[in-house]
Image (tube, rainbow, N blue to C red):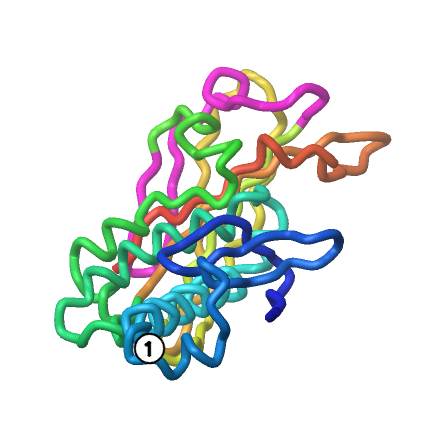
């Protein structure tokens, strides 16, 4: 029985394919216990082969997106990220109205306005969506990736975890081509503020516009820290950290 590869494992079903864990292994099987050879050759299972091909494209696309911004993802993600991203990108793939069944691709669906809208606002940490963490208005300039948060009063406008003393903001501007998997990303400096009642204006500008083709993705990371003896430490509990895909253009 084939095994799942990669760091993030999937459990559940999609179309005719079931992903499950047995002891220490994550496995893949087709519903009904039909042999792989029959699935791959029997004309009766043509639709299943088509589903498998499209699902592979969706999984690969999710990997491209996660890997492209992995520096930020490691600070704010949850155990459902891979499954949620597969579901979202499956919707994007279905928006490919030009390819034949079995060959629909995320790279085509994302070029539609509806495809971009589907990914916009995606939260990498389901436990901590941006809307439940940051209560101050922000603005994004898609020309250079700058994010501004004006009039921020941290204690009033952030949902912060116990023991946190500071908040850190960072943005990223990424170009990603789902067709090739090639991406390039540039980050802003980290802006760190104490959790107090002082009003601040935050400006986060990536170092440059990244090279490469595909579409542009703009991300915002909100991470909480604790100061101890003059040194800031990332909290072990990442449940409150937020990473959100602000826009796709």
Pick the front one: 20 or 196: 20
Pick the front one: 203 or 186: 186
Specify the quadrant that holds the C terminus.
bottom left
**In screen coordinates, is 138 left or right of 134?**
left
Specify the quadrant that holds the N terminus.
bottom right
**In screen coordinates, is 67 left or right of 17?**
right
* Dot 1 crowding, Cα within 10 Å, few <14, some 14–19, many 20+: some
Query: Is 87 located above or below residue 199 in the figure?
Result: below
- The image shows residue 209 at horizontal and vertical percentages of 39, 68
Query: Is 220 located above or below residue 93 in the figure?
Result: above
Q: Magenta span has 152? A: yes
Q: For mark 1, what is the residue? A: 213
Q: How many marks?
A: 1
- Farthest residue to the bottom: give it: 41
- The image shows residue 108 at horizontal and vertical percentages of 23, 71
Write down the region rendered in magenta. Answer: 138-165
**In screen coordinates, is 149 left or right of 109?**
right
- The image shows residue 202 at horizontal and vertical percentages of 46, 38
Q: Quadrant of residue 57?
A: bottom left
């Amino acid at each position: 029985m084939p095994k799942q590869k990669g760091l993030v494992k999937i459990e559940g079903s999609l179309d005719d394919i079931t992903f499950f864990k047995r002891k220490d292994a994550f496995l893949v099987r087709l519903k009904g216990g039909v042999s792989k050879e029959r699935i791959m050759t029997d004309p009766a299972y043509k639709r299943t082969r088509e589903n498998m091909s499209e699902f592979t494209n969706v999984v690969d696309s999710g990997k491209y997106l996660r890997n492209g911004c992995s520096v930020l993802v490691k600070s704010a993600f949850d155990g459902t990220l891979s499954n949620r991203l597969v579901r979202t990108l499956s919707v994007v793939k279905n928006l490919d109205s030009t390819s034949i069944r079995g060959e629909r691709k995320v790279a085509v669906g994302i070029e539609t306005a509806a495809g971009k809208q589907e990914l916009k606002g995606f939260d990498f940490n389901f436990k901590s969506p941006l809307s439940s963490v940051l209560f101050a208005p922000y603005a994004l300039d898609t020309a250079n990736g700058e994010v501004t948060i004006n009039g921020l009063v941290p204690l009033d406008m952030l949902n912060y975890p116990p023991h946190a003393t500071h908040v850190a903001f960072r943005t990223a501007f990424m170009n990603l081509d789902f067709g090739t998997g090639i991406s390039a990303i540039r980050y802003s400096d980290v802006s760190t503020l104490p959790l107090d009642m002082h009003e601040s204006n935050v400006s986060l500008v990536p170092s440059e516009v990244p090279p490469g083709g595909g579409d542009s993705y703009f991300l915002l990371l909100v991470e909480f820290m604790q100061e101890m003896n003059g040194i800031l430490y990332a909290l072990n509990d990442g449940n409150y950290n937020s990473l959100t895909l602000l826009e796709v253009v």
